[in-house]
Image: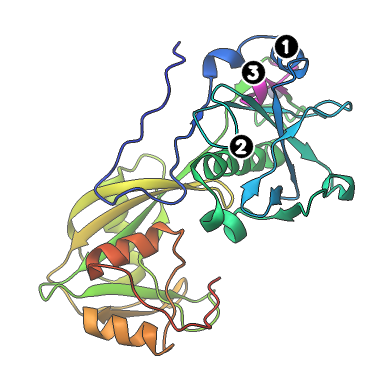
């Protein structure tokens, strides 16, 4: 039981765009049965709105509105208290209200509905933290409405951080799916990038995959690389993580090495894998021959850490 503020921990990979800590999630507050009653009557309380995975955004900020007369809706989620920020005083309670559809009446002062992918790079520390948290937990509610034991409809509790089954009293907690992502290098310090069969265009990225039940992160790195590229890697080193709420992943970034350079893409998930020197990658991206992951992704951060700095893209290239 603690209300101390989260501390920013800088992993070897540096501060990642979606790994923010500007919200004190206030887990001590969630247990109060009358939490939403208490904060609803506080004029300082702010509401973040989402609908269909999009949040209400004004220019480069998440709209944090006063509590409406209609209240918080069916599944309010307590996002926590703000830490110091230019926009809101520290200690402001923020509630996520999820609407069945976008409400045009809320689009005042140029506010619009936008996805996290669209606006992540525009947002400040607090707003990015709120949007990542809100997206992740609301995705869980949307996909976990019923009890996995008996099939009864479950009921949100504890500020929206638990769902309880009224039939068997079981509690169900928000789920996060760990996925490893790995920058593989060979003895010449080239990097291996793969192109997924499902991707449009000539896009290349670091290999990645979900951790399976009963598997360590390191074992997942070795297995995924072998499956997707045919390579045997060793010495997986953890570099940092960031949530990736599309819909519920946690990306765990690694490096790994191989002496083996003959690749065999699986041909199903991965259609091609290629080794790049720094010069080759720089040229391939600059010329538009290939595209790489956007700046908000851990993949881009892994690639640029190996590259030694930002990779320049053609001016007009729109990133997915
Ligand atoms: Zn049940």
Q: Position of residue 194 (x, y in %)?
A: 37, 74
Is 99 placed above or below 118 here? Answer: above
Query: Ligand 1: which quarter?
Result: top right
Residue that carries the numbered disc 2 in the rendered image:
137
Q: Position of residue 250 (x, y in %)?
A: 45, 46
Nearest to N terminus: mark 2 or mark 1: 1
Residue that carries the numbered disc 1 in the rendered image:
38
Q: Quick check: can you spot residue 226?
A: no
Could you tell me how far apart the alpha carbons at marks 2 and 3 are, in whole angstroms? 13 Å
Q: Position of residue 18 (x, y in %)?
A: 47, 48
Query: Which residue is nearer to you in this view: 10 or 27?
Result: 10
Residue at figure coordinates x 89%, y 46% from the top left: 105
Query: Which residue is nearer to you in this view: 211 or 103?
Result: 103
Secondary element at image label 1: helix
Quadrant in the picture for residue 318: bottom right
Count residues near mark 1 (Cα–Cα under 10 Å), then give few for <14, some for 14-19, many for 20+: few
Secondary element at image label 3: helix
Residue at figure coordinates x 25%, y 79% from the top left: 275
Residue that carries the numbered disc 3 in the rendered image:
158
Magenta-highlighted residues? 156-168
Q: Is residue 194 left or right of residue 161?
A: left
Is 211 placed above or below 320 here? Answer: above
Q: Position of residue 21 (x, y in %)?
A: 44, 35
Residue at figure coordinates x 36%, y 39% from the top left: 214
Quadrant location of the N terminus in the rendered image:
top left
Quadrant location of the C terminus in the rendered image:
bottom right
**Of marks 1 and 3, the one in the foreground:** 1
């Amino acid at each position: 039981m603690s209300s101390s503020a989260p501390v920013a921990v800088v992993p070897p990979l540096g501060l990642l765009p979606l790994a923010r800590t500007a919200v004190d999630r206030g887990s001590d507050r969630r247990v109060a049965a009358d939490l939403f009653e208490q904060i609803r009557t506080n004029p300082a309380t702010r509401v973040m709105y989402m609908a269909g995975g999009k949040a209400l955004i004004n220019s480069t900020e998440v709209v944090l509105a006063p509590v409406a007369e209609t209240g918080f809706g069916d599944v309010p989620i307590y996002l926590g208290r703000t830490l110091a920020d230019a926009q809101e005083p520290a200690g402001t309670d923020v509630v996520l209200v999820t609407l069945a559809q976008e409400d045009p009446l809320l689009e005042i002062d140029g506010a619009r509905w936008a996805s996290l992918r669209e606006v992540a790079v525009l947002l400040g520390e607090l707003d990015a933290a709120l949007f990542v948290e809100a997206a992740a937990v609301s995705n869980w509610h949307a996909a976990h409405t019923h009890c996995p034991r008996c099939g009864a409809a479950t009921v949100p509790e504890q500020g929206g951080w638990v769902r309880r089954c009224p039939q068997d009293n079981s509690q169900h907690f928000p789920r996060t799916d760990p996925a490893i992502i790995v920058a593989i290098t060979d003895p010449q310090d080239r990097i291996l990038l793969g192109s997924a069969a499902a991707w449009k265009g000539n896009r290349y990225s670091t290999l990645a995959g979900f951790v399976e039940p009963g598997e360590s992160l390191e074992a997942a790195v070795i297995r995924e690389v072998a499956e997707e590229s045919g390579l045997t890697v060793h010495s997986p080193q953890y570099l940092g993580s960031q949530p990736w709420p599309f819909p519920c992943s946690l990306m765990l970034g690694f490096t790994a090495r191989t002496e083996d350079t003959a690749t065999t893409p699986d041909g199903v998930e991965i259609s091609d894998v290629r080794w790049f020197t720094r010069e080759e990658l720089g040229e391939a991206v600059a010329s538009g021959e290939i595209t790489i992951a956007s700046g908000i992704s851990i993949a881009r951060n892994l690639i640029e850490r190996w590259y030694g700095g930002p990779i320049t893209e053609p001016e007009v290239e729109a990133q997915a």
